[in-house]
Image (cartoon, helix red, strand yellow):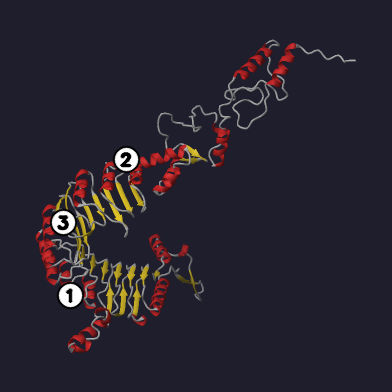
């Protein structure tokens, strides 16, 4: 026998059935309401948790509303993001933004990344890209990556790719290492990303030719500075004509530095903007024309080969006539002579401040006199590898007493410790001095002729023995760097230089530890490679004692009864803030004894 069922009105049945039909299973991250199935955006749900409609003005309106909601829900297309659910989970795995928080954004592109600034690039100061990270923070992180790492970072996601593109477009300086087997397309692909590039530095481990130069000229229209350095295995095949065309086409080029220029042969450089020119490994230049009226710094280093046929006299003469604004000149060649110096002094370069003539064994004291008579305002003078003597140093001290701050006289065998002491005493503005390989012992100077020493005159032997054992005493208030590398004839050394921070004693083999005195409280680096163990120990002990002597001590005060002296705390001291900072900085300094 069947029990009678309670009577259910059609409206209630429709509402209940509709409510059960409208309650789908909850899905994580759905756009629709879990009760009625309508979109969440701007929606107030009319269905209570138990499936009964909560708001019904009339019995007849509720079923209509329920039917309308059902039909609209049934007619709705499926969630477009359900097909990309796995992709969304992938983004979460990479620590990107939570998808559920960002799904109500009205601007959503095809790839699933929102663009809060449609039609233009996002603002780097306000946009958040991933994990709460601002674009400006991501920008600062990515800009510190090398080019290869930056290209890999662009493959992470679309937002990172857009940030890297903006970073490439905004880059003004690029330092790139070109591997040995890299093709030209690698350099071209990198340079084309940087339309605003103005400074380019290439470390090339493969061959360099005119094709690479043309690629740089085409990809970098705003280039102002270019530096190409080559490894030992790389070959620079650029000729003088190709280099001249490159310089003539780049109207904005200000600085050009290139290594391995052994295949130039000859060159004609014409530029009104070029101010710095460095060329190294030059060899047998047949013709050299420099039509650069604004050139201020030039460095020409020639290969050390005896068969070099470069006419340095003609080169220097033309350089002086066509480059009247030169301030810094550096020429390194074994063919430098007194005639070249006379040609340089005849140019009358009034703005010359730094002169470096290296490896010129034919440069003598007469050359020093010519330089001193023509250029009395030099701030740096480098005559390393010359044949000047202590008399030449005397002329330097008489003329450049009020201007010279850097003096380099390495590899000058005719200079003694007396000349070095005289230079430090007469040049009060001196901050850098290099005297490497000047004070050498008899064995290192004349090792091949040791067997013929018995046949030499007695006066010659006495003079050489006198030069073998030399003492050096330097007291200077402004000297910061002193180099005595290779001074194997130095026996005793006494330095009293409060500003000295770098000392080079490499290969000072005969320096006695008990005859070493270092009174240099600012000393930071001491190079002692090739020295005896006892000398290294003496250097370390004197350096540590010097730091202990300038330690930050508190002032001592007596107690009230006058029985005992104690250290007063810093709050009771009367020192100024500047004195405290200065003492604190001195206390933090440490000296490194470098043995490599």
Q: Please determine whether, in this image, residue 214 is positioned above or below residue 583.
A: above
Q: Earlier in the sequence, mark 1 or mark 3?
A: 3
Q: Please determine whether, in this image, residue 554 is positioned above or below residue 43.
A: below
297 vs 144, left or right, is: left
Q: Earlier in the sequence, mark 2 or mark 3?
A: 2
- Do we see residue 424 in this rendering? yes
Residue named by callout 2: 195
Residue at the location (66% across, 14% down)? 67
232 vs 105, left or right, is: left
Contact between labelled residues 3 and 1, with CB atoms less than 8 Å apart: no
Secondary structure beneath label 3: loop
Q: Nearer the viewer, residue 527 or 451?
A: 451
Q: Position of residue 63 (x, y in %)?
A: 69, 13
Residue 33 appears in which quarter of the rendering?
Answer: top right
| Residue 351: image tag | 3
Contact between labelled residues 1 and 2, with CB atoms less than 8 Å apart: no
Q: Position of residue 37 (x, y in %)?
A: 63, 23
Secondary structure beneath label 1: loop
Residue 343 appears in which quarter of the rendering?
Answer: bottom left
Residue named by callout 1: 389
Q: Residues within 10 Å of mark 3 (few under 14, many from 20)?
A: some
In whole angstroms, how far apart are the C-alphas of marks 1 and 3? 27 Å
Secondary structure beneath label 2: loop
Residue at the location (24% across, 72% down)? 411
Q: Residues within 10 Å of mark 2 (few under 14, many from 20)?
A: some
Q: Position of residue 274 (x, y in %)?
A: 20, 49
């Amino acid at each position: 026998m069947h029990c009678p069922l309670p009577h259910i009105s059609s409206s209630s049945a429709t509402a209940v059935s509709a409510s059960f039909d409208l309650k789908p299973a909850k899905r994580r991250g759905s756009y629709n309401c879990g009760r009625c199935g309508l979109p969440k955006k701007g929606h107030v749900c009319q269905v209570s948790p138990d499936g009964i409609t909560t708001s019904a003005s009339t019995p007849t309106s509720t079923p209509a509303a329920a039917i309308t909601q059902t039909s609209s829900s049934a007619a709705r297309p499926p969630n477009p993001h359900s097909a990309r659910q796995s992709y969304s989970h992938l983004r979460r795995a990479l620590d990107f933004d939570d998808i559920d928080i960002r799904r109500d954004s009205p601007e959503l592109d095809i790839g699933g990344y929102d663009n809060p600034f449609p039609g233009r690039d996002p603002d780097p100061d306000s946009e958040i890209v991933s994990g709460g990270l601002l674009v400006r923070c991501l920008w600062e992180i990515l800009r510190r990556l090398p080019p290869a790492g930056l290209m890999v970072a662009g493959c992470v996601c679309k937002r990172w790719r857009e940030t890297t593109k903006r970073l490439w477009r905004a880059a003004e300086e690029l330092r790139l290492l070109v591997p040995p087997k890299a093709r030209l397309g690698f350099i071209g692909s990198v340079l084309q990303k940087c339309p605003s590039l103005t400074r380019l530095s290439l470390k090339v481990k493969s061959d360099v030719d005119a094709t690479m130069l043309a690629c740089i000229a085409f990809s970098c229209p705003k280039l102002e500075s270019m530096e190409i350095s080559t490894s030992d295995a790389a070959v620079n095949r650029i000729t003088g004509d190709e280099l001249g065309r490159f310089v003539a086409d780049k109207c904005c080029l200000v600085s050009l530095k290139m290594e391995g220029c052994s295949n130039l042969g000859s060159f004609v450089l014409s530029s009104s903007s070029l101010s710095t020119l460095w060329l190294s490994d030059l060899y047998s230049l047949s013709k050299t024309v420099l039509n650069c009226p604004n050139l201020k710094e030039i460095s020409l280093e020639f290969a050390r080969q005896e068969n070099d046929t470069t006419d340095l006299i003609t080169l220097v003469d033309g350089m002086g006539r066509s480059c009247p604004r030169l301030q810094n000149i550096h020429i390194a060649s074994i063919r430098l002579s007194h005639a070249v110096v006379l040609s340089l002094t005849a140019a009358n370069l009034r703005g010359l401040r730094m002169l470096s003539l290296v490896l010129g064994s034919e440069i003598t004291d007469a050359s020093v006199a010519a330089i001193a008579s023509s250029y009395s305002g030099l701030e740096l003078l480098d005559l390393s590898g010359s044949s000047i003597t202590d008399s030449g140093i005397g002329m330097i001290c008489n003329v450049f007493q009020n201007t010279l701050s850097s003096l380099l006289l390495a590899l000058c065998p005719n200079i003694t410790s007396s000349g070095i002491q005289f230079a430090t005493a007469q040049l009060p503005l001196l901050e850098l001095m290099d005297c490497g390989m000047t004070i050498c012992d008899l064995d290192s100077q004349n090792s091949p002729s040791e067997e013929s020493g018995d046949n030499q005159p007695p006066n010659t032997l006495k003079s050489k023995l006198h030069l073998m054992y030399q003492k050096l005493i330097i007291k200077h208030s402004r000297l910061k760097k002193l180099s005595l590398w290779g001074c194997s004839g130095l026996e005793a050394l006494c330095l009293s230089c409060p500003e000295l921070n770098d000392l080079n004693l490499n290969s000072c083999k005969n320096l006695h530890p008990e005859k070493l005195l270092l009174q240099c409280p600012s000393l930071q680096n001491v190079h002692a490679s090739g020295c005896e163990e006892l000398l290294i120990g003496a250097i370390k002990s004197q350096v540590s004692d010097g730091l202990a002597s300038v330690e930050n001590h508190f002032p001592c005060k007596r107690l009230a009864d006058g029985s005992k002296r104690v250290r007063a705390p810093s709050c009771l001291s009367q020192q100024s803030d500047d004195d405290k900072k200065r003492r604190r900085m001195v206390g933090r300094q440490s000296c490194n004894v470098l043995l490599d």
